[in-house]
Image: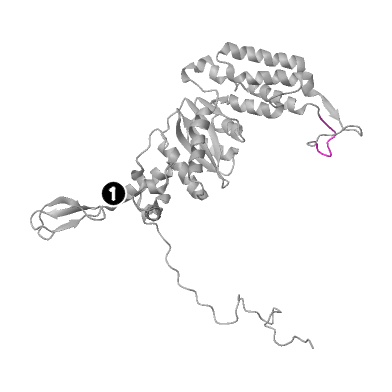
C-alpha cells in the first residue's frame, strides 16, 4: 500500500474477489494468487472430467468460460508412481476405446497400479506393462492375446489363475447354451460347474469328471471327415483342405479345458499353499470395478476426441489408485505456459523460373484458351 500499513479483509468485490483495506490510510486493493487460481481450475476440471455432471454444475461461470479457463488442464498427464512393492495378487485386463486405442490395466486389492496404452493386446505391450512392476505371486487374467507369452517371459515364477467366467464364455461360443448332442450336453454341464467349486476336493472331482468325459466321448474329438463328391464341406473349410474334424467345435471346447487343466491354471485359487492370499477365480474386480466405470464415464462425456478420452481414463485410474497425490501437486509451469514455436520468417522465393505454381503454362500443355478453339 501507499503508507505501508497493515491490510485487513474488507468484504469482496463485485467479481467475488477478496478486498483488502489499509487500516491506516483507508486505501483498498485486491491480491492476485495465480497458484490458487490454477489449483481451483484444475480441481474443477478433474471433478467434471471424472464425474457425471455437466460443466454448468461444476463452476458458477458459463460453460464457455469454463472451457476457456481450463483448456490448459488437458496438458496435465497423471501417472501412478512405481513403488517396487511385490503384490500378492494382480488382475490384468484391457479396455478398448472408440478411436482405436486400448488401455491395459493392472489392479490389486481393487486399486489400479499401472496402465499401458496400445493399439491392441499383444505380447510386446503386455511385456511393457509387466516390466514396470515386480513379479507378483499370482496373476488373474482372462487369457487375452499375447498375455500368455508375456507372462512366460516377464513373470515366469508367477502363478496364473484363468478367469473361469471367460472360460465358460469361450465354451458357450463353441457349444452354445443348448447343445444338441449328448457329448456336448455333458461337456457343457462340466463347464457350468467351473464357478461352483469352493473346495479343493470339488476341483479334484471335476477333473475326474473331465477325464471320464474323455473316456466316453474322446473318440469324437479325433473323428475326421474326408472330402469327396458326395460330402458337403462346411463354410469354414478351405478349398484346398482334404479333411477336417467332424466335431470341430466340440474338439475346441474340450481341448480348451484340457490345456488349462494341464497348465494348472483353472484352480490356482484353491491351492492350499496360497490360501492366505484370498485369490479371486474371476476378473470381476477389474471388469465390474474399473472397466464398467470407465465405460460409463466415456458414455457420460460422449463426443470427446480420442486424446481427451485417454486423459479422462488416466485421471480416473490415477484418482482411484491407492496412494495418489492431490491434482494440484502435478501442475508444472509448462502446463499453463507451454513453449510455443517462434514465428518463422517468410522465405523469399529465389529469382528465376517458377519451380512450383498453380498457374497454367504452355510447357505443361495447360494454358488459358481463347476464341473458338478452331471451331467454325
The residue that disc 1 covers is: 36
| Residue situated furthest left in the rendering | 24
Mark yes or no: residue 261 visible: no
Does residue 27 lie above or below 372 as drawn?
above
Q: Which residues are magenta?
A: 237-244
| Predominant SS of the magenta segment | loop
- Label 1 environment density (alpha carbons within 10 Å; few <14, some 14–19, many ≥20): few
Q: Nearer the viewer, residue 144 or 13?
A: 13
Which x, y percent locates residue 370? 69, 86
Give the residue at x 81% y 38%.
Answer: 238
SS type, badge 1: helix
Q: Nearer the viewer, residue 218 or 46?
A: 46
Does residue 196 lie above or below 32 as drawn?
above
Q: How many marks?
A: 1
Quadrant of the image containing the N terminus: bottom left
Give the residue at x 40% y 38%.
Answer: 319
Which x, y percent locates residue 79? 43, 41
Give the residue at x 41% y 61%.
Answer: 340
Quadrant of the image containing the C terminus: bottom right
Mark yes or no: residue 97 visible: yes
Amino acid at each position: 500500500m501507499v503508507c505501508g500499513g497493515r491490510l485487513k479483509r474488507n468484504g469482496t468485490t463485485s467479481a467475488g474477489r477478496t478486498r483488502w483495506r489499509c487500516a491506516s490510510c483507508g486505501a483498498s486493493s485486491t491480491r492476485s494468487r495465480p497458484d490458487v487460481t490454477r489449483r481451483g481450475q484444475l480441481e474443477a476440471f478433474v471433478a467434471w472430467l471424472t464425474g457425471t455432471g455437466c460443466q454448468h454444475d461444476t463452476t458458477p461461470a458459463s460453460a464457455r468460460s469454463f472451457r476457456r479457463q481450463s483448456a490448459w488442464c488437458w496438458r496435465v498427464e497423471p501417472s501412478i508412481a512405481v513403488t517396487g512393492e511385490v503384490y500378492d495378487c494382480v488382475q490384468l485386463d484391457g479396455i478398448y476405446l472408440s478411436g482405436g486405442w486400448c488401455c491395459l490395466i493392472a489392479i490389486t486389492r481393487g486399486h489400479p497400479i499401472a496402465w499401458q496404452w496400445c493399439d491392441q493386446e499383444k505380447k510386446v505391450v503386455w511385456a511393457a506393462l509387466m516390466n514396470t512392476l515386480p513379479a507378483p505371486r499370482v496373476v488373474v487374467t482372462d487369457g487375452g492375446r499375447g498375455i500368455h507369452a508375456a507372462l512366460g517371459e516377464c513373470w515366469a515364477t508367477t502363478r496364473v489363475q484363468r478367469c473361469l467366467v471367460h472360460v465358460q464364455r469361450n465354451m458357450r461360443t463353441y457349444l452354445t447354451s443348448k447343445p444338441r448332442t449328448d457329448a456336448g450336453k455333458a461337456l457343457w454341464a462340466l463347464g457350468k460347474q467351473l464357478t461352483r467349486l469352493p473346495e479343493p476336493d470339488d476341483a479334484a472331482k471335476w477333473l475326474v469328471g473331465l477325464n471320464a468325459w474323455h473316456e466316453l466321448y474322446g473318440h469324437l474329438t479325433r473323428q475326421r471327415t474326408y472330402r469327396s463328391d458326395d460330402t458337403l464341406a462346411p463354410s469354414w473349410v478351405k478349398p484346398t483342405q482334404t479333411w477336417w474334424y467332424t466335431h470341430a467345435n466340440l474338439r475346441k471346447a474340450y481341448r480348451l479345458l484340457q490345456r488349462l487343466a494341464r497348465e494348472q491354471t483353472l484352480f490356482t485359487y484353491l491351492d492350499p499353499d496360497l490360501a492366505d492370499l484370498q485369490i479371486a477365480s474371476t476378473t470381476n474386480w477389474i471388469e465390474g470395478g474399473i472397466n464398467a466405470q470407465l465405460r460409463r464415464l466415456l458414455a457420460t462425456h460422449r463426443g470427446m476426441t480420442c486424446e481427451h478420452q485417454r486423459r479422462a481414463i488416466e485421471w480416473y485410474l490415477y484418482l482411484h489408485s491407492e496412494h495418489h497425490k492431490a491434482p494440484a501437486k502435478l501442475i508444472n509451469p509448462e502446463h499453463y505456459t507451454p513453449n510455443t514455436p517462434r514465428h518463422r520468417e517468410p522465405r523469399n522465393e529465389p529469382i528465376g523460373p517458377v519451380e512450383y505454381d498453380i498457374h497454367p503454362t504452355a510447357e505443361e500443355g495447360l494454358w488459358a484458351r481463347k476464341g473458338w478453339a478452331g471451331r467454325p
